[in-house]
Image (cartoon, coloured by chain):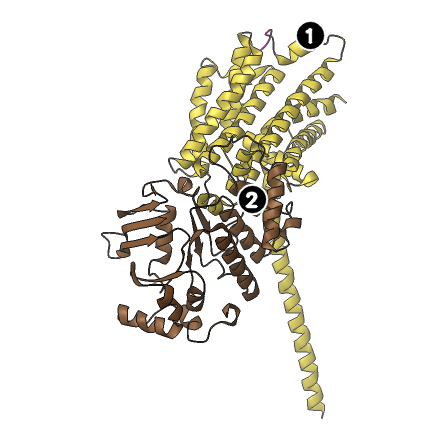
Chain colours: A brown, B yellow
Amino acid sequence: MLTIDKAQKTFQRGTPGERIALDRLSLNLKRGEFLTIIGSNGAGKSTLFNAITGAFLLDGGSIVLAGTDITWMPPHKRAFTIGYLFQDPMKGTAPGMSVEENLALAYSRRKAWPLRIGVSKKDSALFRERLARLDMGLEDRVKTKVGLLSGGQRQALALLMSTVGEPHLLLLDEHTAALDPAAAERIMRVTCGVIENQRLTAMMITHNIQQALHFGSRTIMLEEGRIIVDIAGEERKKMTVPRLLELYSRRSRKELDNDRILLEGSGVPPSEFEV
Amino acid sequence: MTLFIGSLHLGLIYGLMALGISITFRILKTPDLTTDGSFTLGTAISASLAILGMPGYGILFAILCGGLAGAVTGLLQTKLNIHPILSGILTMSGLYSVNLYILGARSNVSLLGSEHLFSQAAALFPHINRNFVRLWVAFLLCAACFSVLTWFFRTHLGLCIRATGDNDDMVRASSIDVDRMRIIAVALSNACVGFSGAVAAQYQGFADIGGGVGMMVVGLASVIIGEMFFGHRSVTLGFLSAVCGSVVYRLIIALALKSDFFPAYALKLVSALIVVTALSLPAVRDRLRVFGLKREALRRKTLNQEALGEGELRADDR
């Protein structure tokens, strides 16, 4: 579904602050695969997402999504087939517009006439039905302004917005990190449900190693813009947090330095993500 | 009564401009300074074509050219990455020359003796009071513009523009072309402003190169005054507020002028003061709140100290 071939990106090239963010990174994602991504601060996790969404262009290499080369495509055109969920629930929705207006924005089809009415009766019914599936009580609040919803509700809405158009790829950038534990667990459950139901291909950045191993079907670990660990299937099932950390230090010849990962990956699984 | 009717006329005509201003100021949340130029552009085109005997086309072209001027500002803002305020100033400045050219290198053109929208309407209904006909014309034009805008901001394109003003981050991550939305919104806003200028020129019977100076502030004042009545909870209410605000603004001005409260040339100063007062209210309120908290804390501190002091005294007594 997604093929990244030798992606190369250097920030501030030619200055003392030069930093290689992506180092000839190659990645191949099959249809329906759910990839979780971990790595220390500045390992290139977000850079990888930004390269895929087109926030910047690559210095070298190529990105092919569902058979289309998107290396040079402007961000808003890529967004037709890529769903993106921010860490900050405030970023993914428009606070001054109602729930159904937000959904209508996301539910745009490429060739539709731009002056059609924004929220038709038919759309409204569809949105209600999809909101009901989230089980967050949003279906009764379609006319409510999104700014009045809680962080968890806003994130659930943002999730629905990024998946309602059946994207080829769903990118989740620590999308539960800014929520309280209960809301985080709920959003994670909803996310998995949506991915499973629509058989989406998804990538999720997380700082929680336990979460990375528990959810999804494949896990990669990034370091200095390269993939240093790539596990799936049986190998991944047997993997534990301490063994992954050990693997990391062996491959990168240093301790994992992520202020957040060390806290949460230290052997004791966070209760909310226990099986 | 004539004062009231006159204010109503002007209020509705300048209400068209207030509608345009509320698009950029409230929906896009970026004030647009093209207004001063595009208003004069509207008056110039409308007057020039009315003199040639085509008042209707004058208004039509004024709307189109106003939109075009807005599109130029939009292009500067987005594709050329010039600061929105500066983009507006640049277009406004350039328009000065364009307006002079349209007016035939004269600073003032009179419509005396030529047909225009209001005289045509009066000729259609000879038995009705002239002022009443004018009121109807102004009202119908304003209502038409209001309806079109209300409808437009309910369409998909309208939703996209509202989202662009509401959450830029979200729109950038979605399939909406932010630049195009901004250009369309600024163009639409200035089309309204041009429309307003065009009708104003035919109403007043002249076009003046300095006619648009300070118009943006007048528009802002109208939008802000209007929000005291209906607020801007929804786009429709926001538009309604803008038109009502414009009428109230004209009434205030007319009353103030009649009562010799201040001379006519103080108009723009008063408008600016209204806008400053309204925009600074939140900041002033915050200051007052902090001031109150501070005083309260100080008061408690002295109370505590007094209580402590009394305690010590008692200890000494013992």
The number of numbered discs placed on residues in the rendered structure image is 2
Identify the magenta region.
B111-116
Q: Residue at x 56, y 22 (%)?
A: B195
Instruction: Look at mark 2 in the image and give the residue it sits on.
Output: A103
Please state which amino acid type lies under the numbered disc 1: Ala
User: Extreme front residue here?
Assistant: A234
Q: In the image, is residue B113 part of the stretch drawn in magenta?
A: yes
User: Extreme left residue here?
Assistant: A14
Q: Can residue B266 be seen in this view?
A: no
A67 left or right of B305 in image: left
Please state which amino acid type lies under the numbered disc 2: Leu
Q: In this view, does A183 lie above or below B8?
A: below
Q: Is residue B272 visible?
A: yes
Mark pair 1, 2: CA separation = 51 Å
Query: In terms of secondary structure, what is the magenta stretch mainly?
Result: loop
Instruction: Look at mark 1 in the image and give the residue it sits on.
Output: B123
